[in-house]
Structures are given as structure tokens and as C-alpha cells.
Amino acid sequence: MEFSRRSFLTAMGLGTAAAVAGCATTSPSGSSAADPTGPVEGDITFLCALFEGATGKETLEGKLIKQFNEKYPDVNVTVDYTDYGSLNEKITTGLASGLMPDVVTLGVGWIPPFAFKNAIAPLPESLATRYTYEERVLEPSRFDGKLYALPMVLDTRIVAYRKDFFEEAGLTGTPKNWDELRDYAKQLTVKDGGKTTRVGFDPFSIDLRQCWETFLFGNSGELFSTDGREVLFDSPEGVASLQLFLDMMADGSADFALTTEAGQPTTLQQGTSAIMMTNNSLYVQLQQQSPELVDKIGTFVLGNTNPAMLQGGTMVSQSATSKHPAAARAFVEYMGSPDAVLVASEQRGSVPAISDLKDSDYVKGNPMVEFAITNLDKARSEGGTPAWMEIREKIKPTLETAIVGQQSAQAAIDQLAGIANDAIARL
Amino acid sequence: MAVVSAPRDVSAPPVVPTRSPAPRRRRAGAARRRAGMLMVAPAFLHALIWIGIPVIAAFVLSFTHYDVLTQPRFNGIQNYVDALTDPVFRRGMLNTLVYAFFTVPVAMGIALLIALMLDTQLRARALFRTAVFIPQVTATIAVALVWLWIYDPRNGLLNAVLGFFGIPAQNWLSSTTWAMPSVIVVGIWQGIGLKMLIYLAALQSLPKDVYEAASVDGASKTRQFFSITLPLLKPATFFVFVTSVISAFQAFDLIYILTDGGPANTTTMMTYEIYKSAFREFRVGYACAQSIILFVFLLLLTLANRRLNGGDSGRH
């Protein structure tokens, strides 16, 4: 057997065609939504970004799935655990290989991109009224008027402050707008020999993208038009939101270098900030790391012209290509039920997505979760365009260019708008 | 009794065999080739399936708009135009060059120095060799986590040591000034082990008689190093250089854990941008084009190095 150049090239060409065809045939594009009728049985996989660690695994598999199997004994659920950092990769490789999990957890803002490309199946509208939801909570689960996911847990970005520092500075009440925030932050900043030992305000300990979005919404700005085809964040409100951080850095009341390091107590806990942007899970962290500070830390919703709280979270969705759609649907419905939602929220210190749970012992016993759940009417979500997955990755590094002084706030926002417009044009 | 034998006709033509040996040799050659091909076949198939087809598929996909969710759409050279005009990818290219420029020669120099020191009758040299090689075999995740602690601005070792000498603390990984040098230092430290090992192996195979002759001729140790050791190490240097450049251009895990490409893209690399395009942004066609650009980069660098060094044959 001899390989001629021609036969070699032919073989490689055929191989390539097969590879490309393989990619194409595994694509769910154009596939109809998985039919959920039929017997609830079969092996399904669950790509899960919740229930971290051994405790989480025990909770999910030892409690929740066992409970699910009592009702559906013929369904075998295999869990693929991941975290938000790797969730995208898992989904991408799953889609490319034709091994998309039957049920997936997705983040806020992710529904439009996946629904637009028919990767996830629509759910019946009746599931939206099965339990009580704030409409703001359900908003990120919808695309094109259809429901595609059930919200499980919410992670809200709120403002936390040290009551003892406020008292020392003679400050009563919390800032109502940006002018007051700047004024408070200046008064709360402490310098020792020219070196800042405490910043008045720490906006940088959460993801810069989410921080800026919170301020954008609080300044009555919007990310995109309702149909997700037009960029709206390049408005004066969007630029002013970024400029606020630059101004606070310029007057010394915020510092890009003075932030919370991964795995470390927050700047608020360390006393190196007096006000900070944080997540509602801070309460669990306080209980574990600094119980003496539990009563010394308060929270408020900030806005300039419109109080706004950013609402992230985790939703559960059904793959459009599931081979056992009835089983997948049943599992989605179960994971969106109060039983699973409450357990998932407790495990992470998150806000349960179902409003009926606001009277639960868990919510009553966690002041930050209770604070978030009572302010859900002010909640705003990121995303809103099918091009979100591409745009979201560019926001933080582009905004950072302004924060580190490489370009102005206006130039950074213009650059970001250009990137977003290009991404939308590629849809 | 005399035995008279018939005189041997030396000029007589050799007896022509009924079957020529040439076809037999050909058959034997063909059989050897078949056997050779059979032996090579597993490796060839492995390379074809896991390297050849993906490489060609990546090349084909680089001319398409492919997002995994929908079928690829041919878009000509648009991905290449986008990549070459994308300021972040261009920044990644520059950062990769800077990273390679500093990590490769510095790590090679240090590795050679350590190899020279360990190629002596040093006490406990096996222990030293192991110590130098350990970073190479330690998981990058573990390495990066240790360095994250070293670089921690508040509780890190580095700032604590600097503070002891009265030098102000730095925000090593969040500062646009210090982030890249910090990553480079880790890259150099991690890469020394393997380079040292290759140099050490090469040093131990150098002919001793050349050094003896040089000593007899009165050549100093320094002269011997520059006139004998370095030239004889040329093939090893070529190998170390090429593999180090490729490794530097593929730097990913350190960036992923230490800086996430930030702040403000100051430590993003070509590989990191490729990863982000494919797995975070679902722009697989675009990521393929970025990969091809990286491949061309590496190919040109290797060819240039081969030309500059006169190849890897070791002739000098």
C-alpha cells in the first residue's frame, strides 16, 4: 500500500469535510423544540453550576435528586458539576460534540443568546404562574415573549456600609444619590502619612461589569433596546456612570488597587473601606469570618435618578436536543420548585427566586437576603441581546482601560459600543 | 595417483540462476515497506485523527462564521481582518512577544548556568537537580496559587520582604505597571527546570578529550566554555529555544489563574484571546483564524531561528 500525494490530500480533504460536517450535523439550529410528551423515563445529564463542594453534592444527589426519583423512578440523573468560570466551556464543547446536557443551569443574560440559536427549549407559560414570581425576576428567563428557563437563585449586587464608621464620622442615614455618595466617601476616607488606609467607597471588589451596570441602571440608563438590536449604553448616563468611578479615584475616596482579593475577607470586613459594592452572600461570609461585624454592617440600594439593584442569578433550562425531553422537562420543573430553590439558596446564601419563600425561616434569618427580596422591585438584569455572550466578555477589560487611565470614560464607552454593535451585526 | 582436475575456466561466465535475485530483493523490500507502514500506521492514524484533521478543520473553519450553535457560514477572510484589526488581539500579540522575549532567553541563560553548576562533583547534586526540576512537574494551578499568595498585596510574601527593607508594597497583579513583569517572573521560574535538564544531558555527553586537549594547550575555563562548550551545545540550544518559544507562545494557564488577562488587557496573550473567543464568546470561526495567525507566528519564528543557527544539525 503506497500513499501518493494525491491520495493523501484526498484523505485529508475527506477528513476535513467529515469534521466540518460533523460540527454541522451536531448543531441544534433549526431543530424543533424537544417534545416533552411521552413517558418520563431515561438517562439525563444535568450540567450544574450550583451545589459546589462535597456538601453541595450531598445536598443535590443525596436529597433533591432522591426526592425527584421518588416521583420519577425511571429517570436516571447524572450530574456534571461545574462553576460559572467553566460553564461556558462545558456548554460550548457539549454543543460542538453533540453532547449537550439535557438540563443546564444558565446565568442571567444567557437566555436570549441560547434561545435565539434554538439551543434551549421553550417552556409552557403555565410554569411562570405556578408559583409567585416578581416580574423582574422572570424577565431574564424570557426571550421573544416565550419562557425558556425557571429562575432558581438570585445573586443581587447591593451596597453595604460600616455603621460604626458612619457613626464615627457623624453621618446619619445613607447616601440618596451620587453627589451624596461622593460627599460621604470623602468624609469616610482615612489617610495616614499620605497613604490611604481606608477608602470611602470600594466599587471594585465586585466585577467591574456588574458594578458599572448597577450605576448605569441607577442613572436611568439602559444597556440595549427592547429588541436587543440597538446599543443604548453609550448614552450620557452610561459615560457618567464610568466617569463617577474615575472622579472618586481622582479625589482619593476610591482606589482600584484597594480591593478584595479572592478568598480574602472583604475590604469592609478588613476596615479598609467604609462603603462597598457587594453581593447578598456577604452575610454568610460575615457569619463565618467576622461574626463580630454582623450587626455593624448595613445595606442600602443606591441610585442617582433611579434606585437600582443588579440582579444576577442562576436559572434552569432544558436542552432543545434532549433525547428524553419528558424526563428533562420534569427535572427542570422540579429544580424550579420551592423545595429545590430553597435548598439551593441556603447552600449559597442566595436569594430564592420564588417570592412565596420570603416568609421562610431561611430568608427571615438572613438580613441581606431579606433586604434583597424586599427590594426586588428595584432589580435590574444584564443582557437583553442575543449577542450578549460575546459582548459581556469585553465589558470589563474595556472599562478597565479607563479606570487605569489608558483612555477617557467617553472613549472607553465608545469603544465598547463599537464592539457591541459589531457583535449585534454578526447575528 | 595423481588427480588431475580440469582446469578452471576463470573467464567462464557465472552460472545464470534460473530466477533473478532482483525481484526477490524487490519483494523483500516491499515486504519491509509494508511491515514498516504497518508499524507506523497507529502513530500515523493517531496524528491524522487528533492533529491532522483538527488542524485542517480549524483552517477551514477560520474562513467561516461559526458559533457552535448554528452551521458554519463562509465569510472569506473576514475573521483574519477582524483579528488583525482587533486592538485587544493585537495587544495579546504584543504581550505574547514581550513575554517570550523576556522568559525565553533569561530562563535559558539561568538554566544553562544551573546545568553547568550541577554538572560538577557537587555534593547532593541529585537533590539540587530535583529541586530545580520540581516546578516543571508541579501542576500550574498549584504553582499559580502559591504565586498568588506571594504576590498578595496585603498578606503576600513579596511585599512582606520588601516592607522589611522599607520598600513600599506594590499591587503586583492589579497594576498595569507590574502585572506583566510579575507574570514573566513566574514564567521564567517555571520554565527553568526542563531547560536545565536538557542542557545537563547535553553537557554530560560532551567529549572529554576535547577539554583535555584544550587544557594541555593552556586554554582557561572561560575560554573552554566559549570556544568548546557553547558551540558544542548548539543543537541542544536550538532545541531548547524552539520548544521554549513555542511554550512561551502557548502561555495560558498562568494568565488564566493569575490575572485573567487584566488589568485592562495588559497581560492577555494570544492563546488567552483564542480561548475567550471560542469558549466564552462562542466565536469559534474567529478563534480558528486567531489560531492560524498564532501558528504562522510560530512557524516564522522557528524558520528564522533555524536559518540564524544554520539548522539543528550541530554542524559548526
Image: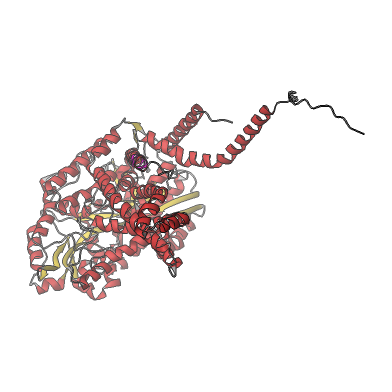
Q: Is residue A205 visible?
A: yes
Q: Residue at x 59, y 38 (%)?
A: B36
Q: Residue at x 26, y 38 (%)?
A: B84
User: In what quadrant of the picture does the C terminus of chain B appear?
Assistant: top left
Q: Is residue B305 magenta?
A: yes
Q: Main secondary structure of the magenta part?
A: helix
Looking at the rendering, the stretch of residues picked out in magenta corresponds to B298-306
**What is the quadrant of residue A427 in the picture?**
top left
Q: Is residue A59 visible?
A: no
Taking depth in this image into account, of A251 and B178 the one nearest to the observer is B178
Residue B283 higher or lower than A316, as above or below: above
Residue A375 x/y as whole percent: 20, 59
Q: Residue at x 45, y 36 (%)?
A: A19
**What is the quadrant of residue A302 in the picture?**
bottom left
Residue A245 higher or lower than B86, as above or below: below
Query: What colour scheme was applied to this rendering of the protein?
Result: secondary structure
Taking depth in this image into account, of B277 and A356 the one nearest to the observer is B277
Residue A384 x/y as whole percent: 24, 45
Taking depth in this image into account, of B203 and B70 the one nearest to the observer is B203
Residue A149 x/y as whole percent: 34, 48
Q: Is residue A182 left or right of residue A424?
A: left
Residue located farthest toward the right when viewing the structure as drawn: B1
Q: Is residue B30 left or right of residue A384?
A: right
